[in-house]
Amino acid sequence: MHKNFGQRGFTLIELLVVIAIIGLLSSVVLASLNSARQKARDARRVADIKQLQIALELSFDEHPTTGYPATLAGLVADGNIPVVPTDPRSGTAYYYAASGTGNTSYCLGAAIESTPVPTSSPGCTATGFNYFVKP
């Protein structure tokens, strides 16, 4: 039997230090990914609201006497959008309220995760929503 006394392996302390460093680096990466995911969801919410605005204006142009639809489902019925978009995280509907005499105005809202939210529209308030647009 031949033994190699000149070769050494890693000590337990060295292995634990390397594992701790890998754990620390992975937690930093995961925190960065969560921030990027949050920003991506917010970008989708803003894009959804813009698409709903376009569909609402198309609907208003098609039906000027009845005004904006009472619900967002009316946009699907008119063929202006294929489906009503929902929040990418919770799957809940965006805030929508038609108002004014003959539904001549509306308010759209979404719950943006990042702060600060650079929007506020007079007359548009709803619990749980912090990003609003009006025509």
Image (tube, helix red, strand yellow):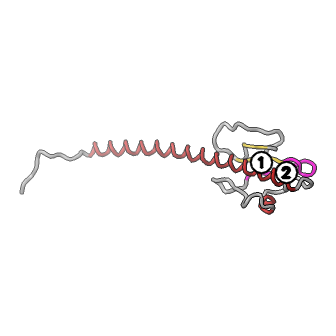
Is 22 included in the stretch rendered in magenta?
no
Task: Give left or right: position of 10 versus 60.
Answer: left
Rendered image quadrant of residue 69: bottom right
Rendered image quadrant of residue 120: top right
Rendered image: mark on residue 108? 1
> Where residue 92 appears, x then y in whole percent?
70, 56
Q: Identify the residue position indicated by label 2 in the image.
A: 98
Going by the numbered disc 1, the residue's amino acid type is Leu
Are the residues at dot 1 and dot 2 in contact (C-beta closer than 8 Å)? no
Residue at 89% of width from left, 48% of height from top? 104
The tag earlier along the polypeptide, 1 or 2, is: 2
Residue at 78% of width from left, 60% of height from top? 73
Task: Give left or right: position of 106 versus 109.
Answer: right
In the rendered structure, which segment of residues is drawn in magenta? 94-105
Tell me the quarter of the image containing the N terminus.
Answer: bottom left
> Where residue 129 appears, x then y in whole percent?
73, 46
Rendered image: mark on residue 128? none
Residue that sits furthest to the bottom in the current view: 77
Going by the numbered disc 2, the residue's amino acid type is Ala
Task: Give left or right: position of 121 versus 63.
Answer: left
Tell me the quarter of the image containing the C terminus.
Answer: top right
Residue at 72% of width from left, 51% of height from top? 51
Q: Residues within 10 Å of mark 1 (few under 14, many from 20)?
A: many
> Closest to the observer: 91 or 76?
76
Residue at 77% of width from left, 58% of height from top? 80
**Which structural element holds mark 2?**
strand
Task: Give left or right: position of 110 versus 24.
Answer: right
> Closest to the observer: 14 or 98?
98
**Which structural element holds mark 1?**
strand
Q: Residues within 10 Å of mark 2 (few under 14, many from 20)?
A: some
Alpha carbons under labels 1 and 2: distance apart = 9 Å
